[in-house]
Amino acid sequence: MEGDTLKEQKKLKRECISLLNQQLENGKDFFLAVFPNATIRADFDSGEKSAAAEIVLNHRIDMIRNAAHHILDVSTAVDPTTALQKVSIEGLKLTNEMSDNIIQTIVKVFSCDRKLTEVDFLFLNEVSLALAFPSARVQYIIDQVQYEYRKVFFNTIVDDLNDDQCDFCAILLFNAIQADDQIHPAEIKYFENISQLLNYDQARLEDIEEAAAAFNFDMPVQIPDEIAAYIFDYLVEIVMCDRKYDPKESDFIQNVAKTFSFDKQRQEEFIQPVASALMIKADLFQ
């Protein structure tokens, strides 16, 4: 039986191809309605100098469909960037909506069971370059998809944790945002998850702000290891999202690691991949 992640990835790919097919057919139908007897003049491989527009459009649509299938297929390969080099997608002409659909699907496929890695960002960059898709738009799609997936995850853990555990996690997030004694614009988006943990209770949020100011890592609160791992990874992302790792932020992360009983090796298993991914992401898409 397929794992839930694989099923979700296949579902996302099917939906992407279905939407792409609809976009392609709609475009062809519109063109042929406006130019019903159009002829395309070009030097074709057959040696012909012209061909009916419908024949040319059908051929191009088949090429686009095949390329899209290959792009989505290799996105889940062990080494997707290398696998992509075997796919002919250079100069692939798509509308912005079609490219948006493909890029968004790839980001969702990558996000199904894990955070995005430097390999994921390199693959997205290769695809976006081939599609001549703006890097700023790729950045927006990445941030939007990650925001949506984080929101779903925090809704899930709220059901798995009691109020004290949620308060503890909220305090950690709150203190991570201002670990260097300032709030960077890139960190503002993380306040949404604090509100989720507190069920959007304003009075509770005010209590958490006070508790965060007096927090000393001695709170006798235990959370499941799987959730602790996600929270720790998330805290690392928060303190590094401004592309700086202040000594105060480093001290904060190390104290959290001690609270979660993470040894030095396990800390590095989180810190290095996050730092590398954020650096690659910033260099490619900002």
Image (cartoon, grey):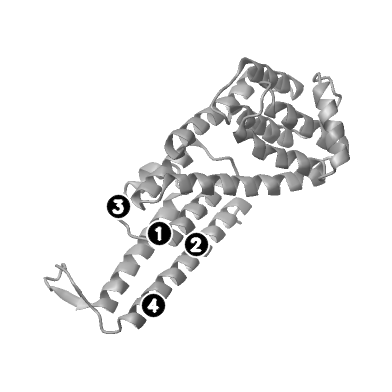
Numbered label attached to residue 68: 1
Which residue is label 3 attached to? Answer: 90
Distance between the Cα atoms at labels 2 and 3?
Answer: 20 Å
Residue 165 % position (x, y):
83, 35
Nearest to viewer (mark 1 / mark 4): 4
Numbered label attached to residue 16: 2
Location of residue 174 by image quarter: top right
Distance between the Cα atoms at labels 3 and 4?
Answer: 26 Å
Is the Cβ of the residue at disc 2 closer than 8 Å to that at disc 1?
Answer: yes
| Residue positioned 58% across, 57% down in the render | 7
Which residue is label 4 attached to? Answer: 30
Query: Which is nearer the N-term, disc 1 or disc 4?
Result: 4
Query: Which is nearer the N-term, disc 2 or disc 4?
Result: 2
Residue 254 % position (x, y):
68, 18
Query: Which is nearer the N-term, disc 2 or disc 1?
Result: 2
User: Could you say which is closer to the camera, residue 124 or residue 179?
Assistant: 179
Residue type at mark 1: give it.
Ala
Residue 263 in the figure: left or right of residue 38: right
